[in-house]
Every structure is written in C-alpha cells, then in structure tokens.
C-alpha cells in the first residue's frame, strides 16, 4: 500500500512540474490549418502575388505600380452572397478605375469542393457577366491565406505608398449582402473616396458576411 501511495505522489509531482514549466500559445489552441498563417492587418504592406486570369494571362500586384491603389475582392460564383455582389463589383470598377483604383477579384475556392468554381467555369462566368476586371484563380490558396480572407466576398482596399500597397480597409463591400437597394453603408466606396481626397478611412474593418472559404489541408 505504501508503494502505491509513493508512486501516486511521484506521478502527481511530475504532472505539476510539467504544467508549471510548459506554456500554451494561442496557435496550440487553434488546430485549424489557417491558424499557422499570419493575416494582413490595417497598415500592413501587401506582398506581391502572381495569379492566372481567366483570359490566360498572369496578373501580379506589381503590374499596378502606376495605380493610386487597388480594390482586392476575394469572391467566387458558387456562393449566392458573392453572386449578389457581382453587379456592385462591376459598378465599383467602373467608378474608380479611371481614378486610379481598379478592382481585382480573386477566387480562392477549391474546385474539388465546389465544382462550379473550376477554372473553366470561372471563364464562363466572367464572359457571361461581362467582368471588366481581372478574375484570378488562387488555386494554391496562398494569396487568400496571406490576406487572411475567410469568406466570399471579402474586400481589401489598398493604398499605394511609395513602392508598396498598404492595407486601409478590410471587410464587407456594403452593409446589405442580399439587397443592393437596402444598403445604407458603402464601406469600400467610402474608403476609396476618402483616400482619393487625402483623408483617412473612417471605418477600417467590418465583419464580412458570405460563404466560408474551405481551405485545403
């Protein structure tokens, strides 16, 4: 009996020592693959990316060195929320491309999960809807991970500063994903308008509403 009691004391002592000397980090409490990637925050400089457009050409951030900024939108066309924003995205590009703030859209969806988001389907959708902006395939999902994109659609407004593009806004395009006529807050539009006027962005982050991006392992 004394031997068993002694063994129990030794084991408990070892557990207590381990608990006292080991510290859990936030990433250990978040086992998802996404937790190992850092995401851009307001004020961060965006690294160059180079992705295939639906017309077959490669498009990179460096191609826009002459722009004042860029509106980057992660989107898809299997998602009803993303579809509801197509006309609004077209309107944003029409409004701001001539002012130096063009739109770039990026599809990070895994076509093995969403067959409607295959590259061929992307080309068909862009043609049928008359996309007047690049629609890029992020087949490795590295760009979406770098940005920290979680849903489609999700918007990022970047301001050109020197040779870098700096994140100024992250989140929703506006405050009504389902009904364009019911929108009262136009976050991307207001952000770009302020930046073009040399003013700070008043609302810098909002929580995107849309379809969750399912990342590959």
Image (cartoon, rainbow, N blue to C red):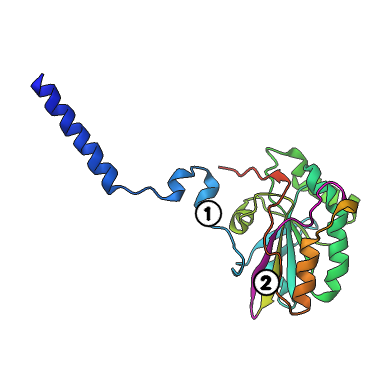
Q: Which residue is mark 2?
A: 62
Where residue 29 sits: x, y (%)? Answer: 45, 44
* Circle 1 Cα neighbour tier, 10 Å, few/some/many (<14 / 14–19 / ≥20): few
Q: Is residue 141 left or right of residue 132?
A: left
Front residue of 7/46: it is 7
Alpha carbons under labels 2 and 1: distance apart: 23 Å
Front residue of 104/53: it is 104
Q: Is 170 one of the magenta-colored residues?
A: yes
The dot on residue 170 is: none
Q: Which residue is mark 1?
A: 37
> In this rendering, is residue 117 above or below 154?
above
Front residue of 3/155: it is 3
Badge 1 element: loop
Residue 101 visible (yes or no): no
Residue most extreme to the left: 2
Q: Residue at 84% across / 65% down in the picture? A: 93
- Select label 2 or label 1 by which is in front: 1
In the picture, residue 161 is in which quadrant?
bottom right
Q: Residue at 78% across / 77% down in the picture? A: 196
Q: Please provide the residue range marked out in magenta.
A: 162-179
* Circle 2 Cα neighbour tier, 10 Å, few/some/many (<14 / 14–19 / ≥20): some
Q: Residue at 71% across / 71% down in the picture? A: 63
Where residue 70 sits: x, y (%)? Answer: 74, 68
Q: Is 185 one of the magenta-colored residues?
A: no
**Which image quarter is the C terminus in?**
top right
Where residue 105 sits: x, y (%)? Answer: 76, 58
Badge 2 element: helix
Q: Is residue 140 left or right of residue 129?
A: left
């Amino acid at each position: 009996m004394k031997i068993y009691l002694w063994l129990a004391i030794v084991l408990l002592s070892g557990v207590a020592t381990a608990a006292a000397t080991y510290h859990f980090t936030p990433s250990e409490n978040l086992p998802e693959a996404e937790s190992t990637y850092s995401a851009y925050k307001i004020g961060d400089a965006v690294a160059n990316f180079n992705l295939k457009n639906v017309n077959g050409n490669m498009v990179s951030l460096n191609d826009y060195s002459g722009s004042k900024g860029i509106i980057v939108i992660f989107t898809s066309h299997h998602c009803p929320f993303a579809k509801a924003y197509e006309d609004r995205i077209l309107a944003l590009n029409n409004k701001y491309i001539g002012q130096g703030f063009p739109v770039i859209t990026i599809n990070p969806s895994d076509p093995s999960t969403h067959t409607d988001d295959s590259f061929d389907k992307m080309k068909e959708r862009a043609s049928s809807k008359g996309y007047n902006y690049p629609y890029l395939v992020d087949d490795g999902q590295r760009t979406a991970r770098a940005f920290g994109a979680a849903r489609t659609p999700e918007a990022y407004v970047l301001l050109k500063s020197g040779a870098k593009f700096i994140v100024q806004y992250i989140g929703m395009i506006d405050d009504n994903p389902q009904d364009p006529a019911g929108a009262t807050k136009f976050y991307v539009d207001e952000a770009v308008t302020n930046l073009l006027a040399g003013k700070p962005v008043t609302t810098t982050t909002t929580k995107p509403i849309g379809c969750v991006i399912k990342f590959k392992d």
